[in-house]
Image (cartoon, rainbow, N blue to C red):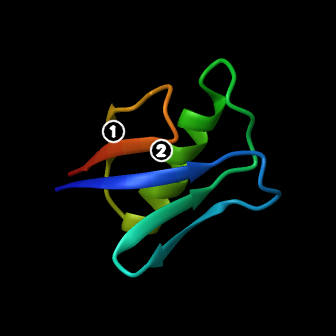
Amino acid sequence: MRIEIKVKVKSGRSGIVEENGNYIAYLKSEPEKGKANQELVKIAKKYFGKEVKIKSGLTSKRKIIQIS
């Protein structure tokens, strides 16, 4: 399954919220050297309970993730 997720970095909290069918990921990490992407994969794996990979949007605030 693929979903689009919007990422908000340096938010002071870490977690995923679903609002009206849209997913928003709040990350504590800064978007440098892939730290935010690593945190996103970690919290998405915990949230969905499955393996997660970023399919597109590595440098964007909007990302497509693959859940398997």
| Quarter of the picture holding the N terminus | bottom left
As displayed, is residue 44 above or below residue 59? below
Secondary structure at numbered mark 2? helix
Q: Where residue 28 sits in the image (x, y, percent)? A: 75, 49
* Label 2 or label 1, whichever comes before in sequence order: 2
Residue occupying the point 44% across, 27% down: 58
Q: Label 1: which residue? A: 53
Residue occupying the point 39% across, 42% down: 63
Tell me, yes or no, whether the two marked residues, 2 and 1, touch with CB atoms within 8 Å.
yes
Q: Which amino acid type is marked by label 2?
A: Val
Q: Which amino acid type is marked by label 1?
A: Lys
Residue 29 as seen in the image, left or right of residue 53: right
Query: Looking at this rendering, what residue extends furthest in the bottom direction?
Result: 20
Q: Label 2: which residue? A: 41
As displayed, is residue 39 above or below residue 11? above
Q: Where residue 8 sits in the image (x, y, percent)? A: 64, 51
Q: In which quarter of the image is residue 53?
A: top left
